[in-house]
Image (cartoon, coloured by chain):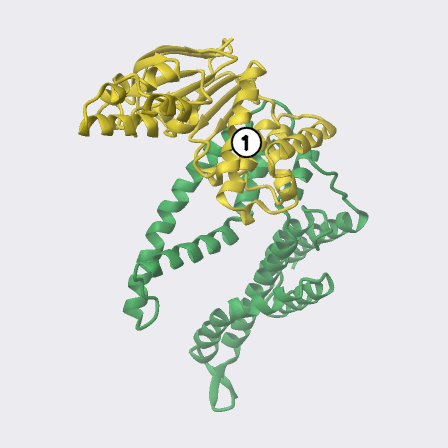
Chain colours: A green, B yellow
Amino acid sequence: MARAHPFTGPSLTIAITLLAFLLPAPAGPLWLYGGVVLAALITGALSAPWHGALICLPLWFFLFLLHGVLGADPSWSLGSLSLSREGTAMALGQAARLGAIVTATLAMYRGFSVPRFVDAASERGWPFQYSYLLVATIMAVPRFVSQVHHIREAQRTRGLRLTGNWLTKGRGLKALALPLAFGALAEAEERALALETRSIRAPVRRTPLHVVQDRFADRLARWLGWSSVVAAVVWRLAS
Amino acid sequence: MSVVFEGVSFRYPEARVPALRDVSVSIRPGEVTWVFGDLGAGATTLLLVASGLAPRHTSGVLSGRVTVLGVDPATDPALQGDIAYVTASPEAQLSHVAETVSQEVAFAPANLGWPRERIWNAVGQALERAGVAQLADRHPAELSGGQLQRVVLAAMMALEPRIWILDEPASALDVSGKAMLHVLLREAASSGAVVLVASEDADAMAGVADRMIVLSEGSTILDDAPSTILSGDAVWQVCRGSTTLADLARRAGAIRPASEFCAPYPITVPEAVARWRR
């Protein structure tokens, strides 16, 4: 994945997200999820399926509870549980959608290189401001996670408690959320100033620092991804 | 060609008092100009205005006229790459699109559209001069504050700017880093660049700067050679500090009034030794 063209990962992730909602549930999203897990394993993003499942697990549980256990017309049983057939199918479809999107996103992050993406965008003649905006959006999640970690550690040194009952945890969240929100605003301002001092407004095309190879396999993968989306749209409209 | 302030006043949004009041100075090329003042005196604002970042980034109201190399720094894109602006916080100046120090230093030259070969040559030389060539392949996030400040300085050196504007550039540097910075400032001035530095480190800047501007409450109060200003009493009336030796002389004079503790105060150690030998 690290050697792939930097447009391939984000492009396929968007295509997979669209396919997850275009394909009929539950079979479509389930097949898609299986394919994404397999692709992640083949391309070396071994931890993505595992981490994806860990992230999705609480949501899967609630989907199963809401639609399967508490769903209308319980018509089959799993052990001592009476389950709704329709509700379980819906839960499976939603869970697979979620799993496919999260796994694809994690696999994309694993191979994503910011400087390579910026170089690739510069090679295509994109204005740097736009590619920077895209990169900042893509990297917002890991940045957010890292900020949460820093703020949590800082607040802990000031006596913040994040263990205990829900009320204590709720209070702790407030102590994290406010610095996070204000910190994000301050950081945005700081970054704008930093970029300004680094010639971002220069009225010339940015030089890519390295040549980024766009191999046949990359182009084929992107083409297949988007062709699948188009085919799925046509199929759903026709059926 | 220089940085010229003509009757410049600046007020931040919702501030009761202006940060700069009717400042008229000309910062000449070929010399290191040092801006000195207490916190809130207006030194950082002066630098932000000179670099065209205020009021564009800070908001606020600017009156008067500022020209840098004959043009308005706030609006003229021709100055891109000509102005190197260094802040006290190196983390705040990172591009966040680099995975190595080399890429970080190459960021601005790439934005200026330089040919790739020229970029990497400039990056190599700048890293050497800043003493961080051994960090070229490290991730900027792994570096200490002092190392980052050197990287930021290298990033600015790579541009070969005609205007150096530095706000407390030594705040994160160790002793050798400060020595490197002082050599850089002198070399930049010798090459004909405009060098404008805001610093509270009077001991260090006294030996580096050619000219000293003292600000108080946004106004220029004193403007002369550092040795003249720092050895006198006037600077103490508007600032809470000067050099360590001048401070020592004043404190000693307060305890035992004597001619050797009166102005002009010694600025350097040899001057103090010559004066206080008895």
| Direction front: furthest residue | B278
Which of the image's four quarters has the C terminus of chain B? top left
Which residue occupies the foreground of this view, B190 or B78?
B190
Q: Residue at x 43, y 34 (%)?
A: B88
Taking the image as drawn, is residue B62 in sight? no
Q: Position of residue A180 (x, y in %)?
A: 38, 51
Report the residue marked by disc 1. Answer: B180
Chain letter for mark 1, please: B
Regarding residue B152, the answer to whether it shows in the image is yes
The quarter of the picture where residue A159 lies is bottom left
Local crowd size for mark 1, using a 10 Å CA cut-off: few (<14), some (14–19), many (≥20):
some
Residue B197 image position (x, y, % from top left): 44, 23
Q: Nearer the viewer, residue B216 or B81?
A: B216
Whether residue B33 is situated above or below residue A105 in the rendered picture: above
Residue in the image at 67% along x and 38% along y = A119
Q: Is residue A74 above or below residue B242?
A: below
Q: Is residue B259 left or right of residue A143?
A: left
Q: Residue at 63% across / 56% down in the picture?
A: A110
Side of B106 where B261 appears, left or right: left
Amino acid type, mark 1: Met
Toward the bottom, the furthest residue is A80
